[in-house]
Amino acid sequence: MNLEQVRNDLSFVRSWSGRENYHFTWPFPHQTISCDVYFRAPKKNVDQAQLDRLNAFVQDYARYIPQFDEFIAQSTRAYERWAFLKGSVGIVEFQVIDFPLDTTKYDFVLVAAKTYERLLWKRSIGFRAEFRNGEIISMKRCRSCTDDN
């Protein structure tokens, strides 16, 4: 993906809060849903660095999955381990990736969830991961991760 494709092919969205973004969905091959991708673009300005971060993540996302699985396993409560993790396998599904323009805090944020099923129960464990320089710098569980973004 390049800057010209972003400006010509992607949807430009202005949220009720005033945030301006280019938006599109990306179909990661390991998951059943498409991921919403946002490039923050005040006054329709997009930076090549935002695109470079997306391209790097798309090429290398599989290396982060073991870290996500480990984080979920370590952050589950006892009843979750008993009810959902025992004998159940889920996959991490990326829901939203947000690429801000000019921030020192992080390069981008990924919101994802892993859903487990056992008998008639279904449980989704959501988390938010912040990345800088191709590495995860923080992860936290959240009920409504997109509100934190």
Image (cartoon, rainbow, N blue to C red):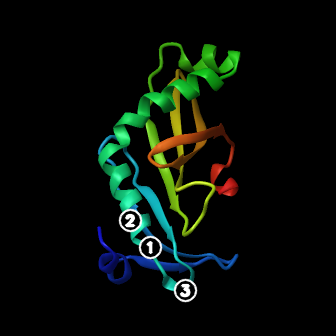
Residue 59 locus on image (x, y percent): 29, 48
| Tag 3 and tag 2, C-beta contact below 8 Å | no
- The residue at the point 55 percent across, 65 percent down is 100
Would residue 117 appear left or right of 149 to someone viewing this image? left
Which sits in the foreground, 11 or 5?
A: 5
- The residue at the point 61 percent across, 21 percent down is 74
Identify the residue under disc 3.
43
Local SS, label 1 = loop
Q: CA distance from mark 3 to mark 2?
A: 17 Å
Amino acid type, label 1: Asp
Residue 2 locus on image (x, y percent): 30, 72
| Tag 1 and tag 3, C-beta contact below 8 Å | no
Identify the residue under disc 2.
51
Residue 23 locus on image (x, y percent): 46, 70
- The residue at the point 48 percent across, 30 percent down is 67
Q: CA distance from mark 1 to mark 3?
A: 12 Å
Which sits in the foreground, 121 or 78?
A: 78
Q: Residue furthest bottom?
A: 43
Local SS, label 3 = helix
Nearer the observer, disc 1 or disc 3?
Answer: 1
Amino acid type, label 2: Leu
Q: Which mark is residue 47?
A: 1
